[in-house]
Image: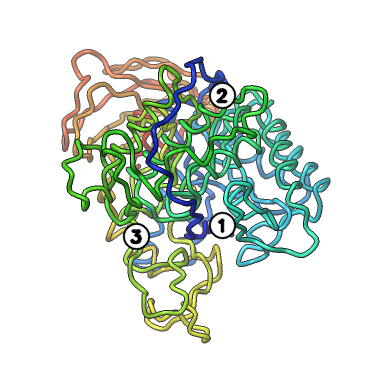
Amino acid sequence: MAARSRYRHHLLAAAAAAALVIAAAVPAAAAKPAPLAWGPGAPLFVDPASTTVQAAAGLSGDAKDDANLLAQFPTATWLTKGTPQQVQTAARAVVTAAQSQGTVPVLVAYFLPNRDCGQYSAGGAQSTAQYKAWIDGLAKGIGDTPAAVILEPDGLGLIPNYVSPLDGSSNCSIPGVDPANRFVELNYAVDALGAKRGTAVYLDATHTGWQNVGESAQRLLKAGVQRADGFFLNVSNYQRTENQVAYGRWVSSCIALAARDSAADPAAYGGFNGCGNQYWNGGPDTGWSGTAMDNTQVWRTAPYSGNPADLAWNTVGIDSRYASQLGTTAPTTHFVIDTSRNGQGPWTGGSQYSDRQDWCNPPGRGLGVAPTTSTGYALADAFLWVKVPGESDGQCTRGTGGTTDPEWGGIVDPAAGAWFVQQADQLITLAAPAVTQPCRVAYTVHGSWPGGFTAQVWLTNTGTRALNGWNMRWAFTHGESVAQMWSAAPTQAGATVQAANLGYNQVVKPGQTITFGFNGAIARGSSPAAPTSFAVNGFTCTA
């Protein structure tokens, strides 16, 4: 089961091109300290029992190869149902498995009452009290073990009966539901999960094709983002990574303005409509000329030449606007981005249909940037595969009134969360960047004796960049330990081993293979086994 962020515009009227009153610069509210083990370079969990692995078991031929390839990448684990005890058990199993690898799992909490506004992924808790109990179970299951939690996809994009105080719009109606409950539930979850010393918590800020910046900032503040680790973008959607980075930076800047100028209650800030947003991008550096940003193009910042056509991709107007407003105030709210299916950007076809359903199994899409916690952007904590690539968004019909999907040759699409063979193949074929795991590891036990063994490990750089310094991690499964290692420097904590480069083998060029070996100890009567997963510099390797 998976959420699908609706690709709907939530527009504000174009901001007037007027001079801005710059408030006195004061420091923004301090961000929550980063949780243990979560930060740049943190290795992400690859679940050996993931839904992708399960799908591969029932496939054959090329379809099986596709699923097995995708199973090598870290993807999120969705927790969508069950009693408090059941979700506690499920979460505990995931974080325990990740801990044995020395990695950090990404968990999706998806159990809000009236989730998905009762549509394709309807379900969840039956009451606020039931939801709080479920969240308590999830928090107990995670404990103090490192984990990142994507808290309720669409949770702030689809709020039943919520009317925006900024522009009066509403996009989700369910009779008898109090919209205030949504903020009560999310605030409770932020506090319950955030109290765990190893847990990073992120709230929903939709994406560039949905809520404008001010709307996202206000809803995030109402939901407790200042006590969370930040927000997430583009879950189950297709918007370009570069554009999400810009949007995330603007949302963080708008939050910083609200925290600075309305410190007692940032959600009551009166300037959300004045936060520069993707639907009108004028600013000082464009002479207040502006237009809507074009999601089909890669956004970037460049000196404005005066050509109106350039405004659709140029962020300089909004960037200069925030610079003038912020002064010395620095945005501190971080974010993560779902890059699981955005390599080709959003779908632009389907104009012949009464309902394009461009969020639902659009054709011609590709995988995006591989999951990593080293993004190169100060506020972007991670690029993640939150939506499991290869799993269907639902049975899409493009408003035709039939049961089949004309964009996939007239087939009946798999149900939401079920494996979609044709889509998995397309995502791999059209991946941008191309699907190449940056490393390949071979591990061989050369010999053993009662209480000991010898192993050799080979590391091949299969990526396009040289490894300038490397650190390999794996977890033993049979109680093994390293006694003596050559050609690498070992450390071991429990079952998890790290082998780091020495001075002479620090650089591994593309296509180059290096090797190291070790003598190990093992309990008499036990046999050493090859580990099932290896990561180098936080990236999972083909084993």
Q: Position of residue 88 (x, y in %)?
A: 72, 41
Which quarter of the image is occupied by the C terminus?
Answer: top left
Q: Secondary structure at mark 2?
A: helix
**Foreground: 135 or 289?**
289
Going by the picture, which residue comes out furthest to the bottom? Answer: 402
Residue at which label 2 appears: 261
User: Which label's residue is closer to the chain start, 1 or 2?
Assistant: 1
Count neighbours of disc 2 (C-alpha within 10 A) and say few if under 14, some if 14 to 19, many if 20 or more: some
Disc 1 marks a residue whose amino acid type is Ala
Badge 1: residue crowd in 10 Å (few <14, some 14–19, many ≥20): many
Residue depicted at 54% across the width and 33% down the height: 230
Kindly check if marks 2 and 3 are in contact, taking CB atoms under 8 A apart as contact. Answer: no
Question: Hey, which quadrant is residue 299 in on the image?
Answer: top left
User: Tag 3: residue type?
Assistant: Leu
**Colour scheme:** rainbow
Residue at position x 34%, y 17% in the image:
485
Residue lying at the far top of the rendered structure = 503
Q: What residue is disc 1 on?
A: 3
Q: Are marks 3 and 1 in contact (CB under 8 Å)?
A: no
173 horizontally vs 542: left or right: right
Of mark 3 and mark 1, the one earlier in the sequence is 1
Q: Amino acid at mark 2?
A: Asp
Measure the C-alpha gap from mark 3 to mark 1: 18 Å
Determine the image quadrant of residue 430: bottom left
The Cα atoms of the two marked residues, 2 and 3, are separated by 45 Å
Kindly identify the residue that appears in the image at 19 percent across and 39 percent down. Answer: 464
Image position, residue 161 (x, y; %): 70, 58
> Disc 3 designates what residue?
427
